[in-house]
Amino acid sequence: MNLNPLYHLRRYRELEWRNTDLVKRVSGQLKQIEELREEKKSLETQLGTLRKEVIEKDNRIIQLSDLLVPKAAEYVSKNRKEKRGNK
């Protein structure tokens, strides 16, 4: 054990400096974590909105196909009947 008082004072200041530096780094990282959490919430909200839009458009496509497919089938069968009748 070193009995020199200046050694202990120097050692204490060095530890205090390290501690201060560590606290600054941790607080900076905490700020980054909070920013990332806010960004995550924003992205999740956007994702939810986009999912709703996709579902709505998908439902619209299904509705249109339900309307158009029978009409297209009627048109094709009508044309086939006409062609058969002409032969």
Image: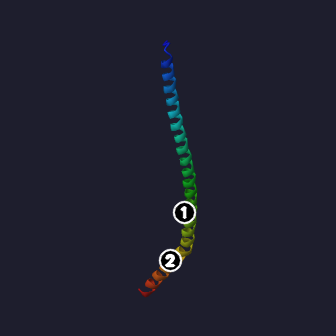
From the image, which quarter does the C terminus lie in? bottom left
Q: Residues within 10 Å of mark 2 (few under 14, many from 20)?
A: few
Give residue 55's position: percent from left, percent from top.
Answer: 57, 63
Residue 42 lies in quadrant: bottom right
Residue at mark 2: 72
Tell me if mark 1 has few (under 14), some (14-19) or many (20+) residues whose alpha carbon lies within 10 angstroms of its own.
few
Give the CA separation, mark 2 to mark 1.
Answer: 26 Å
Amino acid carrying label 2: it is: Ala
Left/right of residue 80 with respect to residue 49 in the rendered view = left
Residue 30, placed above or below residue 1: below
Q: Which of marks 2 and 1 is in front?
A: 1
Residue 52 or residue 12, whichever sits in front: 12
Residue at the image point whose x is 54% and y is 69% from the top: 61
Q: Please identify the quarter of the rendering in which residue 49 is found.
A: bottom right
Choose between 40 and 60: the one closer to the eye.
Answer: 40
SS class, disc 1: helix
- Classify residue 62 as left or right of residue 81: right
For disc 1, the marked residue is 54
Q: In this orientation, which residue lies closer to the viewer: 39 or 24?
A: 24
Which comes before the other along the chain, label 2 or label 1? Answer: 1
Percent position (x, y) of residue 26? Answer: 53, 37
Furthest residue to the left?
Answer: 87
Residue positioned 52% across, 73% down in the render: 69
> Residue 59 appears in which quarter of the rendering?
bottom right
Seen in the picture, residue 35 relative to 77 is either above or below; the reply is above
30 is higher (above) or lower (below) than 9: below
- Residue drawn where x is 51% and y is 21% of the image: 9
